[in-house]
Amino acid sequence: MKIGIFGGSFNPPHKMHIKIAQKLIKQHYVDKIIFVPTGSKYEYKTNLVADKHRLEMLKIITSKDDKMDVSNYELKDKVVYTCETLKYFKQLYNSDEIYFICGTDNLSYIDKWKNGLEILSNYKILVINRNGNEINELLKKYNKYVKNIIVANIPLNDMSSTNIRLLIKQNNINDLNKYLEQDIIDYIKKEKLYIN
């Protein structure tokens, strides 16, 4: 089985996250996707809502599809690096193939990550083309690892969690249906998330 590890802050998880996962499965890039929310100890993300809320929202959206799951592996009281996460899932699913799902924006500096070149050597990288980053340049940059880099043909729009949080803050709740599933909107309202 091919298992895709989809990391991110998911702050909040939006329709594009789900669309990416559905398309990767439908187009047979992977058989199953596990969403792995980044822990709040990650220094580059300072505006995350509590781990429990992001985990719960991911549980809500993955509960409708048995080919999607969510893991709390990175939600610890210390930073968990991607290399550790992938190693954990490789041990957990030792007879399966682990794919790391990332955007071209992340791929562009994966060599600067902790054990980034080890990730490129040991795992399949399923790349989603984002923000017009030039994939050909990246394939040249990482030509040594090109056999492990798979570029997924998935059209993206400019949906972003940052813009969604801004809409919530500005109380533009009616615009949210374009970006968020109704049960996520309900959860955000109930828990009063992103209003400050």
Image: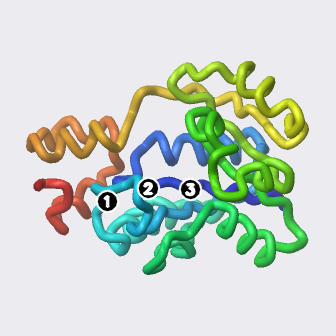
* Proximity of marks 2 and 1: CB atoms separated by less than 8 Å: yes
Please indicate whether residue 49 sits to the left or right of residue 19 in the image: left
Residue at x-position 43% and y-position 80%: 77
- Viewer-nearest residue: 43 or 184: 43
> Residue beneath label 3, please?
7
Give the amino acid at mark 2.
Answer: Ser
User: Where is 177 relative to 186, above or below?
Assistant: above
Give the amino acid at mark 3.
Answer: Gly
Give the amino acid at mark 1.
Answer: Leu
Quadrant (top left, top right, bottom left, bottom right) of the C terminus: bottom left
Residue at x-position 19% and y-position 68%: 191
Mark 3 surroundings: few (<14), some (14-19) or many (≥20) residues within 10 A? some
User: Where is 123 relative to 93, above or below?
Assistant: above
* Proximity of marks 3 and 2: CB atoms separated by less than 8 Å: no
Pinpoint residue 72: horizontal percent, then vertical percent.
52, 74
Quadrant (top left, top right, bottom left, bottom right) of the N terminus: bottom right
Q: How many marks?
A: 3
Residue at x-position 74% and y-position 39%: 27
Q: Distance from label 3 to label 1 (Cα)?
A: 14 Å
User: Where is 116 relative to 109, above or below?
Assistant: below
User: Where is 62 relative to 27, above or below?
Assistant: below
- Viewer-nearest residue: 112 or 120: 112
> Residue beneath label 1, please?
48
Please indicate whether residue 15 sits to the left or right of residue 31 in the image: left
Q: Earlier in the sequence, mark 2 or mark 1?
A: 2
Mark 2 surroundings: few (<14), some (14-19) or many (≥20) residues within 10 A? many
Residue at x-position 63% and y-position 34%: 108
The colour mode here is rainbow
Mark 1 surroundings: few (<14), some (14-19) or many (≥20) residues within 10 A? some
Q: Distance from label 2 to label 1 (Cα)?
A: 7 Å
> Residue beneath label 2, please?
9
Pinpoint residue 192: horizontal percent, then vertical percent.
14, 63
